[in-house]
């Protein structure tokens, strides 16, 4: 998931210098559930919200805050 989050931030949100992405393990994959990942952007810690959009593991990545 971390690699996918990095790709979405770079390609969709046009964020440069995306470093480490750390997402909590063992998250429930239930439609509508959310959790937060920590992302390094240009050396600064940011968070992104992950929202599960289906029982099959699809999810959306929010913009870094």
Image: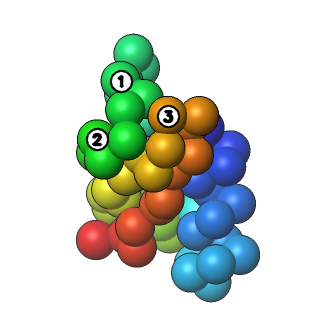
Estimate the spatial distance between the alpha carbons at disc 2 and disc 3, rounded to whole Å. 10 Å
Question: Would you call the spot at circle 3 few (<14 residues within 10 Å), some (14-19), or many (20 or more)?
Answer: few
Q: Secondary structure at mark 3?
A: loop
| Marks 1 & 3, CB-CB < 8 Å contact | no
Horizontal placement of 63 versus 20: left or right?
Answer: left
Horizontal placement of 24 versus 6: left or right?
Answer: left
Q: Quadrant of the N terminus?
A: top right
Q: Quadrant of the C terminus?
A: bottom left
Label located before the other in sequence (1 or 2):
1
Quarter of the rendering containing residue 35: top left
Q: Mark 1 — residue?
A: 28
* Place of residue 19 in the rendered image (x, y in percent of width and height, measured from the top left): 58, 54
Q: Mark 3 — residue?
A: 55
* Residue occupying the far bottom of the picture: 14
Q: Secondary structure at mark 2?
A: loop
Label located before the other in sequence (2 or 3):
2
Task: Tell me the tag on residue 33.
Answer: 2
* Place of residue 38 in the rendered image (x, y in percent of width and height, measured from the top left): 36, 47
| Residue in the foreground of this view, choosing between 62 and 9 | 62
Residue at the image position 57 percent from the left and 46 percent from the top: 58
């Amino acid at each position: 998931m971390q690699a996918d989050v990095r790709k979405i931030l770079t390609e969709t949100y046009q964020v440069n210098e995306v470093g480490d992405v750390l997402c909590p393990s063992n998250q429930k994959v239930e439609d509508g559930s959310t959790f937060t990942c920590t992302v390094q952007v240009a050396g600064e810690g940011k968070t992104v919200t992950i929202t599960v959009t289906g029982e099959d593991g699809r999810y959306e990545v929010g913009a870094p805050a």
